[in-house]
């Protein structure tokens, strides 16, 4: 397995009511050749992760319509694309949508913490695509068991290929799924729906960080 073959395998998967950013073109927001650009971004990101010797995954649930659907990078919105190459030297990530830069508050929490680490983790999701409601492409829903089975083997290949030794699961879905890979799993609360303070406290404990600040009282969906 290498980054090119892995991304090609991801791009070959087609599912109803699931946006695959490495194959699908959004008729509303995407520039021309956006899917190709996202494939290239993910490939360069995975190559950079391998070159850094990263052995930890921060694992979320799936791509959100404000973040990874647009960027093709897990837990990363357009606001933080300029930070990708800085934290993962060699990675190339660029905005491939029209209109203003889209922000996602989950991504803001993730990247706020990344800047405090000496070695960043691999950012990934249990389900590496964007599942949405029927006829509502800009909504978020949880993947189904059948959808997840189609990416099980690829997730296992990724863990094996990169030599992942630990998984930090962001939320319960990721914690249950991450346990199957045999690596130690530590769970933190997902920073959505009022979970920001607990998320920060969990990461602070795991990484033995100094105080990383209190969460804003303005809580809401962070996807």
Image (cartoon, grey):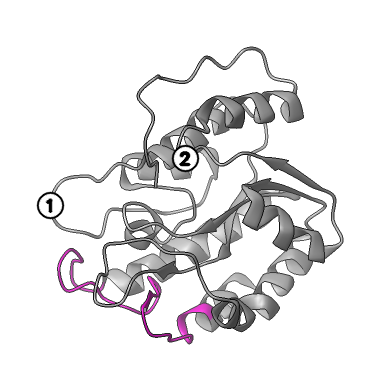
* Quadrant showing the N terminus: bottom right
Please provide percent x and percent y for residue 157: 72, 74
Please provide percent x and percent y for residue 63: 44, 60
In this figure, which residue is indicated by the disc labeled 2?
192
Q: Which residues are magenta?
A: 10-33
Residue 26 magenta-drawn?
yes
Q: Secondary structure at mark 2?
A: loop
- Mark in front: 1 vs 2: 2
Residue at horizontal 36 percent and vertical 52 percent from the top? 67
Comes first in the chain, label 1 or label 2: 1
Secondary structure mostly seen in magenta is loop
Q: Quadrant of residue 163?
A: bottom right
Residue at horizontal 49 percent and vertical 52 percent from the top? 91
Q: CA distance from mark 1 to mark 2?
A: 25 Å
- Residue 11, compared with residue 79, is above or below; it is below
Q: Is residue 53 visible?
A: no
In this figure, which residue is indicated by the disc labeled 1?
99
- Residue 6, compared with residue 195, is above or below; it is below
Residue at horizontal 56 percent and vertical 42 percent from the top? 190
Q: Nearer the viewer, residue 3 or 219?
A: 219
Crowding at dot 1, Cα within 10 Å, few <14 / some 14-19 / many 20+, comes out as few
- Residue 36, compared with residue 105, is above or below; it is below
Q: Nearer the viewer, residue 143 or 181?
A: 143
Please provide percent x and percent y for residue 205: 74, 25
């Amino acid at each position: 397995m290498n980054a090119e073959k892995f991304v090609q395998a991801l791009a070959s998967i087609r599912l109803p009511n699931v946006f695959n950013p490495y194959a699908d073109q959004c008729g509303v927001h995407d520039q021309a050749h956006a899917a190709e650009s996202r494939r290239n971004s993910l490939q360069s990101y995975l190559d950079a992760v391998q070159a850094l010797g990263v052995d930890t995954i921060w694992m979320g649930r799936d791509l959100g319509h404000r973040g990874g659907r647009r960027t093709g990078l897990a837990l990363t919105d357009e606001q933080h694309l300029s930070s990708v190459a800085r934290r993962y030297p060699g990675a190339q990530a660029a905005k491939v949508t029209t209109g203003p830069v889209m922000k996602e508050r989950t991504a803001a929490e993730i990247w706020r913490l990344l800047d405090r680490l000496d070695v960043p983790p691999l950012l990934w999701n249990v389900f590496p695509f964007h599942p949405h409601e029927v006829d509502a492409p800009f909504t978020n829903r949880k993947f189904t068991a059948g959808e997840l089975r189609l990416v099980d083997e690829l997730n296992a290949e990724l863990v094996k290929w990169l030599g992942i030794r630990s998984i930090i699961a962001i939320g319960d879905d990721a914690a249950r799924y991450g346990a199957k890979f045999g690596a130690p799993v530590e769970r933190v609360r997902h920073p959505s729906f009022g979970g920001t303070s607990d998320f920060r406290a969990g990461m602070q404990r795991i990484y033995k960080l100094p105080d990383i600040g209190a969460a804003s009282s303005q809580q809401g969906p962070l996807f």
